């Protein structure tokens, strides 16, 4: 007959509940057996986010029974839910947040943009730098060490850069047309300094009268179907009209003409008898 033996068995259960790993060590003893030890185990678990009792019953080949139990507190995991724009314009800033808890920790990850404020808090500001599909994720960990992740995808849309066509050097009082390329569904707004828009400021073509000498400016703002804004601007040189006045000296039938403004680039005189001149101060004899 075999000698009596003190037998101890250690059973290790690894339980994964709500992404949390619990290691349960149950120590069971059944003493003074004269034959090899065999057992069958049974356990029951309650639902997550509460305390649960785990049971183990064992029986050896002699019919000896023993049992033990352990109470495990199952902590709830956080449930982050990101709120923010899922369609943005390239180089635009957007704010993203989840319900905040001062006892929780937050780790944000952004692909396609850069976090500019709010790192490690429940709310961040992001500048989206790359067109296409980006994403933003937050890993939230509560005071019990339980973690969970939320991710949203963000479409980053390119802006439409408008171009302005038209004269950049004009005379005071003249009217000129300016154009930009139109796209279906896009909206436009023209802004003019140093002149006046004649008609609609929301068309792709605008008519401007420049009435203040100096440097003017014309701007067009374009909004595409995604709501992205971009603009173009052109400075306009507005020159005063030349002074057409002149004086003359008469000597019998010969007249010498002198312009009031001697700094002009060109002159074109018409003496009224089919004769003409391009000199600054011409003389003409009438017959």
Image: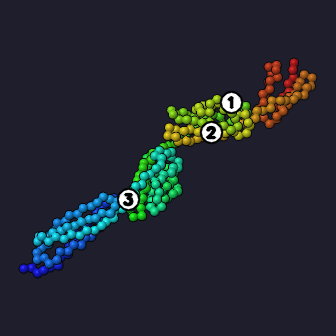
Q: Quadrant of the N terminus?
A: bottom left
Closer to the camera: disc 1 or disc 2? 2
Label 1 sits on a secondary structure element that is: strand
Mark 3 vs mark 2: which is more N-terminal?
Answer: 3
Cα distance in 3D space between marks 1 and 3 = 69 Å
Closer to the camera: disc 3 or disc 2? 3
| Colouring scheme applied when the structure was drawn | rainbow
Label 2 sits on a secondary structure element that is: strand
Mark 1 vs mark 2: which is more N-terminal?
Answer: 1
**Percent x, y of residue 116:** 52, 55
Q: Residue 51 is drawn in which quadrant?
A: bottom left
Q: 276 or 38, which is in the foreground? A: 38
Give the residue number, with chain letter if any, for mark 3. 77
Please report the residue visible at 53 percent of the width from the left and 35 percent of the height from the top: 186
Give the residue number, with chain letter if any, for mark 1. 175
Tell me if residue 157 can be seen.
Answer: yes
Give the residue number, with chain letter if any, for mark 2. 219
Tell me if residue 114 can be seen.
Answer: no
Label 3 sits on a secondary structure element that is: loop
């Amino acid at each position: 007959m075999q000698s009596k033996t003190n037998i101890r068995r250690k059973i290790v259960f690894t339980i994964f509940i709500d992404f949390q790993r619990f290691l349960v060590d149950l120590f069971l003893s059944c003493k003074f057996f004269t034959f090899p030890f065999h057992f069958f185990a049974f356990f029951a678990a309650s639902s997550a986010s509460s305390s649960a009792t785990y049971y183990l019953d064992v029986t050896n080949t002699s019919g000896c029974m023993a049992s033990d139990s352990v109470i495990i507190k199952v902590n709830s995991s956080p449930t982050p839910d990101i709120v923010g724009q899922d369609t943005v314009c390239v180089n635009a800033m957007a704010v993203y947040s989840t319900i905040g808890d001062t006892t929780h920790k937050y780790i944000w990850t952004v692909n396609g943009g850069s976090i500019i404020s709010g790192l490690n808090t429940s709310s961040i500001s992001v500048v989206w730098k790359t067109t296409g599909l980006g994403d933003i994720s937050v890993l939230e960990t509560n005071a019990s060490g339980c973690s969970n992740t939320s991710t949203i995808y963000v479409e980053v849309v390119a802006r439409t850069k408008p171009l302005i066509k038209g004269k950049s050097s004009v005379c005071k009082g003249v009217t000129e047309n300016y154009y930009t390329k139109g796209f279906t569904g896009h909206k436009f707004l023209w802004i003019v300094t140093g002149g006046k828009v004649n008609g609609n400021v929301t068309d792709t073509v605008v008519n401007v009268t420049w009435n203040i000498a100096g440097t003017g400016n014309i701007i067009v703002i374009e909004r595409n179907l995604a709501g992205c804004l971009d603009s173009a601007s052109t400075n306009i040189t507005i020159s005063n009209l030349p002074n057409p006045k002149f004086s003359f000296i008469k000597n019998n039938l010969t007249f010498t003409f002198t312009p009031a403004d001697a700094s002009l680039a060109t002159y074109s005189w018409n003496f009224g008898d089919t004769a003409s001149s391009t000199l600054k101060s011409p003389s003409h004899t009438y017959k």
